[in-house]
Image (spheres, rainbow, N blue to C red):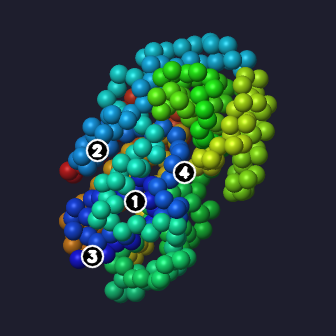
Amino acid sequence: MRTVLISGGGIAGPALAFWLRRHGFVVTVVERGPGVRPGGQAVDVRGVALDVIERMGLLEEARRVRTRMRGMSVLDPEGKEIDRSTEVALSSGRLDSDDIELLREDLVRMVFERTRGDVEYLFGDTITALDEDGTGVRVDFARAPSRTFDLVVGADGLHSTVRRLAFGPEERFAHHLGSYLSVFSADNFLGLEDWQVWLRDGDIGFGIMAVRDNTELRVAFGFESGPLARDAGALRRIITERLASLRWEGPRLAEAARNAPDFYCDAMAQIRMDRWSQGRVTLLGDAGYCPSPLSGQGTSLALVGAHVLAGCLAQAPGDHTAAYARYEERMRPFVALNQSLATENPGGPAAEASVERAKNALSLDG
């Protein structure tokens, strides 16, 4: 049986592990975090990605835990409502759509639970070196003993360690899109009920939605900026200072960001590469083709990519070169369409039609 090491325990990695186990591979997932990571924004599962989670047996559960927005309000910088809708939410699109919006942590948990019984998980560890020869890839870990695997897949996100080790520095492939996104949770001090609010003040803005039966808020705060140093403490200070400067609820939002245990902040960026594979190593999801949250399609790309990659490996037993080539051939047009959602007329009059084309631009059985 062929052995595969997957780096990354978010959505893409465990989804790939699910499909590889179905095809008879022996799978290990290494994840830097101490366990399944909490927090994160609401994510959308759309188009062909809905078919993927249905085939995984997760569709009904995803529908049960989906967000239940009744609508949204758009506020001016003083907090006065200037627009509202009960048909569309900025986080997810039309409320009568078949698409599913759910919290990222819920989807991660669902996929993990489906794989934990027959997939080896190494939490609290990371890859430090890859050494490939004709028979496999010797992998060194920060904590676990070195091991050799037939194949290695980097599903470890925008700042992928596997990509850096196999392809070179991140700077070669990352394209900054001119802004940053922070996501964190807070108590529902606004009293929102299945509702979300959006506000923009100059070059900063945010969206807030009620989750967890309206007991909690999930805040997504964005600001325009060139590239900043990847310093978690400095980024949190920047966010709290900018939130505090807001005219509406600034102090309470700043305090929530300062104390949030699940605080996250990173650049809006895309990963663009001429190839996703090098020898026995390949990349999946944000590690190889991050579209940025501006596209709304990162989760769908991860789920679809996992299904396609596993299928290609199963259809070319023992020939990873052919499998990787077929994976790229099938996924590249789909990736290009979805990445373009973040760079070509985002939010403009053609945006909704573009999303519809992109989310259904690949057949799982092709």
Specify whether residue 130 is in view. no
Instruction: Using the image, determine if residue 246 lies above or below residue 221.
Output: above
Please report contact status of discs 2 and 1: CB closer than 8 Å, yes or no.
no
Q: Mark 2 points at which residue?
A: 58
Alpha carbon separation for disc pair 4 and 3: 32 Å
Tag in front: 3 or 2: 2
Quadrant of the image for the N terminus? bottom left
Specify whether residue 174 is in view. yes
Q: Position of residue 296 (x, y in %)?
A: 47, 39
Q: Which residue is drawn at 46% across and 55% down?
A: 36
Q: Which of marks 3 and 2 is nearer the N terminus?
A: 3
Alpha carbon separation for disc pair 2 and 1: 16 Å
Q: Earlier in the sequence, mark 2 or mark 1?
A: 1
Tag in front: 4 or 1: 1
Alpha carbon separation for disc pair 4 and 1: 19 Å
Q: Earlier in the sequence, mark 2 or mark 4?
A: 2
Q: Please, what is the three-letter code of the amino acid marked with disc 3?
A: Arg
Alpha carbon separation for disc pair 3 and 2: 26 Å
Q: Which of marks 4 and 3 is nearer the N terminus?
A: 3
Q: Name the residue under label 3.
A: 2
Q: Name the residue under label 4.
A: 270
Q: Mark 4, residues whose alpha carbon is within 10 Å: few (<14), some, or many (≥20)? A: many
Q: Position of residue 172 (x, y in %)?
A: 59, 63
As helix, strand or loop, the secondary structure at mark 2 comes to: loop
Q: Position of residue 73 (x, y in %)?
A: 56, 18
Instruction: Using the image, determine if residue 319 lies above or below residue 269.
Output: below
Q: Residue furthest bottom?
A: 134
156 or 48, which is in the foreground? 156
Tag in front: 4 or 3: 3
Q: In which quarter of the image is residue 230?
A: bottom right
Q: Name the residue under label 1.
A: 13
